[in-house]
Amino acid sequence: MKYHVRWSPTAEDELTDLWVDAKDRSVVSAAAAAIDHRLAANAENEGESRAAGIRILFSAPLAATYEVNPRTRQVYVAHIWRYRVG
């Protein structure tokens, strides 16, 4: 079943900053698109659970925290950041 993925204004700003600052913009864009796709397809089973209903998803070189509302099939991406791979 599909989920509707929404990004918080904070997450959108964080992604914009990451993309502007990136030497490899296509990689950042592809990772963000992968996060969107994976969450839309199967949000409850993606990533790892954290406290208070928060989940974290890694799609190199990005990571995102998000919440899932299974009743409404909504996903809310709260934050996104770049992490070092390797």
Image: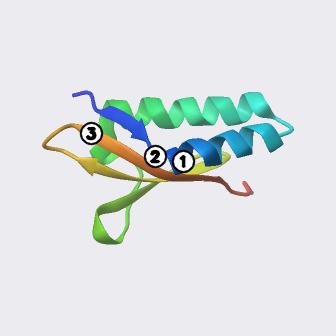
The mark tally for this picture is 3
Please tell me which of labels 3 and 1 falls first in the chain: 1
- 3 and 1 marks in contact (CB < 8 Å): no
Question: Type of residue at label 1?
Answer: Ala
Q: Residue lying farthest bottom?
A: 51
Q: Residue furthest right?
A: 23
Amino acid beneath label 2: Ser
**Disc 1 on helix, strand or loop?**
helix
Contact between marks 2 and 1 (CB within 8 A): the answer is yes
- Dot 3: what SS? strand
Counting from the top left corner in percent of width and height, residue 76 is at 37, 46
Q: CA distance from mark 2 to mark 1?
A: 5 Å
- x, y percentage for residue 69? 22, 47
The answer to whether 57 is drawn above or below residue 26 in the figure is below
Of the two numbered discs 2 and 3 on the same chain, state the one appearing first in sequence: 2
Q: Is residue 66 above or below residue 34?
A: below
Q: State the residue at coordinates (74%, 57%).
A: 84
- Give coordinates of residue 75: x percent, y percent: 33, 42
* Residue in the picture at 55% in, 29% down: 33
Q: Quadrant of the N terminus?
A: top left
Disc 1: which residue: 11
> Compared to 47, does 4 lie above or below?
above
- Disc 3 target residue: 74
Give residue 8's mark: 2
Question: Badge 2, how many Cα within 10 Å: few under 14, some, many 20+?
Answer: some
Q: Residue at x 54, y 48 (%)?
A: 11
Within 10 angstroms of label 1, few (less than 14), some, or many (20 or more) residues? many
- The image quarter containing residue 60 is top right
